[in-house]
Image (spheres, coloured by chain):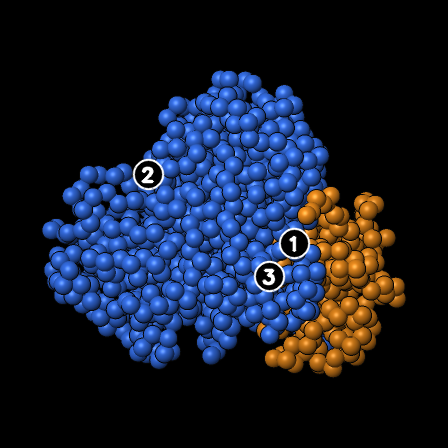
Amino acid sequence: MTMKQTYNRRQFLKGLAAVGATALLPCRFLVPMNAEAAAFNEAEFTIFRNACPRNCYDTCSIKTYVKDGVIQFIEGAPESTYTDGGLCVKGYSYTRRPYSPDRIKYPMMQDGRRSGKWRRVSWDEALDRIAKKILELKEKDGNLLGMGMTKYSGNFGITNYGVEGMMSSLGYTTRFVGTPCWPAGIDAQNYDMGNMWCNDPEDMAKAKYIIVWGANPAWCSVHSMKYIMEAKRRGAKIVVIDPVFTQTAAKGDVYWQPKTSTDGALALGMAKHILDSGLVNQDFVNNYSYGFEDFANYLNANVTVEWAAEQTGIPAKDIKEVAEEFATADPATIWIGYGMQRHTNGGASVRSIDALVAMTGNIGKEGGGARYGQLQTWGFNYHALIQKQPEGSKGFVGNAAKGEFDFTNGTEAQYSDRTVNINKTAQVILDTKDPAIKMLWVSCKNPFAQDFDRPKLEKAFDTLEMVVTVDQFFNETVANSDIVLPVTTLFEEWTVNVSYWHYWLSINEQAIKPMHEAKSNIEIAAALSQKMNALSPGSCTFPQDIDTKEWMAKEFNKDIYSYFGIADWTELRNGPVKAKLKTSAAWPDHKFDTPSGKYEFKSELCEKNGHNALPAFKERRKHYAAFRLLTPHTKFGIHSQFINLDWMQEYDKEPFVYMHPNAAAKKGIADQDMVRVFNKVGEQRVRVKLTDNVSEDCLLMYEAWFGKGNTFNVQNLVDDESADMGAFKAGAPGVAIHDQFADIERI
Amino acid sequence: MQKQYAFLVDSERCIGCFTCAMACRNYYHQEEGIIWRQVYPLAEEIYPHRERAFFSLACNHCANPACLNVCPVNAYTKREKDGVVVHHQDKCIGCGNCIRSCPYGAPKYNPVAKRAEKCSMCHERLDADLKPACVQACPTDALQLIDLAELHQTNEVQYPAGFPKMESVNPSTRFILPQMPKMVRR
């Protein structure tokens, strides 16, 4: 396939070079020593403001350079001190994304799932099929609970919550709630502090001691690294704790490689030493905390540094040294990564780490804090999300769980949506009855690359009568669908974006017209509404004609304007703005949102929800195969996004499994061998790279989707075992992504 | 010394994120298979942990460029004002002399244009007082634009291990070597 659009900036630059060099010269060999292309001239471009919406800490503010209606290149917005004029390897590949020859261009229908027999249909025909199926389900079941919606974080642009809005406007449906990402830690921080709230990451530069615990910002939050490096330059010590010698670890002063999933024991061992050494911050524990004495009693009765050393494999003298340094540095902070809580004891571990930060008086302090994430900047109207069910709609009776990004205030209704656990997608599709889920709408998500136990997922999808997927590329989820609808990229719609880490707000302008026949998620909702009402008047309440710019504008309110210090959203066209924070610290006045109003070392709420009231030790999951299997993020993608772009494949050609040379020798495996990684879930064939970046009992495969001709999928090896926490705030428990085991052999 | 712009590759700060490489592609849209800037992991003999320390490399804009010296049609110029080595693709006949003679492999053959090409140090951006795309993109300032005539740093090296020592061309790129953390491992 070739591109017809004249979007190639390179041709344009070459043209300039030719004009610059030759027009002035009588003879082509008489090149003056300063011959050059004309200087870069910003005025030749129309510049648009965009923001990366793809579930990443950094949520970069983008400047988009357009000429002749075509994106020529993009760069980071210089106004954001966080993005600081740069993007990341993924962001810079965006220029290719709207124009990728592999994009889904039109609505298409597949004759037989996984048959690959796709045919182009009109929007009208596709929506007709979908609408008739919805009406059929409603007719048969008397409600629409047979229609499921699974959506997650492929596009966090606020107007994309119109997908949920569309579902509500059809009636009460079945929603996949929860998050595979961070729920155990969210619950942990909610028990401890009453909310999840982190310091401005930019203030990490002020820290005198930083522990990066189970996070890899060098790959997953590149713009945060400059603050860590700045702190280091100012004399701070950087300790990185991770079972893998990550790129972040390589940049620290000290790297600890504990046994996987023993983080709780490590934190408790440090806490015990701080207690024994008299380094507890008495002002904080006496005045602003609840239950510290119980915690201290627990530590005295159950924890010794030697025990922690045995549990974790980190020598007692090192635990003591870092604990003392951490407790005496002022301010000191811990970045709690999402990776370390994806365990059956992940929530308990996060609580133990929170306790460490709290007992040293570092919560509420600039440059300090137990940093996990924040939703302070998410105070939008959720206009696209909040839609009314058609009159007379019937649904689930009773109160169902709500998802992590549900900002609606619960109103008592006779009916509600039915909620199922997003982390057990396959199992709930197989198990749900009365009515069974017969139709599934997938958007902003690639379940076959993200959801767990992929072999089971295929079986589950086979029970569905209709699968509609809204996407940009023909991924594996699309292959398991009947109808695919092409959706716009961030450059083709209006929306607005904030981060769950930094405090910047960015607008997403429509920089180019939608390519091919792509529509935004809210335009799709409107088109479906038109069709529904044409077939059955009153069957859908979603507006039938919308303008993405108007809808974006409706997401703003007075509170947001005042929080960010702007009078109107149009000011964002001049560049991103940062929240007007009185202080960069979270919890600066030590007034916590817990039942006691204090930091809760002891949480009765936590106990009521089935866990230990104290940040107590929790055993890790038992092995079910020879090696621990870790499947963290790659630097070349966000989950399954970006990996398939041709530009990315220039630098990331093939997936690997990483293995320690000693372990490989025992198995007769040499570097670059093709191997089979297998466990009770399934198997994956892949090439091996030997490295001591992983320990001898670990295998490491980066989560990714490679696209054409490559079936690599780590979800062939990850089961859907739940983490300990997550149901309290996110609606469903997290998933123990890193509590997986596998064996390996040479093919 | 005359002004000579150069890339400073600070491997102590470099996180191997490939942002510089992709920023170049984002700006110039190279044809498939043509890479002007590449990020190379250091061999384990140099840095003992695989893929954890890197050199980001493009054209070195040498003091005595081999490419310029062998080009039969004067398609290369070295700018007097800043030492940037510019390849004029409109003059190039695609003979491949530069590709064969550059000891660092900077010029690449473009099979579509049937001519050579290489990193231009974004000289059209330099002339507009902008940084090269790769330098602007680097999130940790590991890749910087420096002028060798005004070099004040003392810890940089011209020929680190793994980087071929080619004194005849006198490459401009300078390096700061990576360090290692204290490691506590099982």
Residue A328 x, y percent position in the rendering: 65, 26
Query: Which SS class for mark 2?
Result: loop
Tag 2: amino acid: Asn
Splitting the image into 4 quarters, where does residue A308 fall?
top right
Q: CA distance from mark 1 to mark 2?
A: 51 Å
In this rendering, does residue A443 appear at all? no
Between A174 and B131, the residue placed more toward the observer is A174
Residue under label 1, please give it.
A695
Residue B86 x, y percent position in the rendering: 72, 66
Q: CA distance from mark 3 to mark 2?
A: 37 Å
Residue under label 2, please give it.
A557
Residue A616 x, y percent position in the rendering: 50, 34
Splitting the image into 4 quarters, where does residue A480 fall?
bottom left
The hue used for chain A is: blue
Query: Which SS class for mark 3?
Result: helix
Tag 3: amino acid: Met
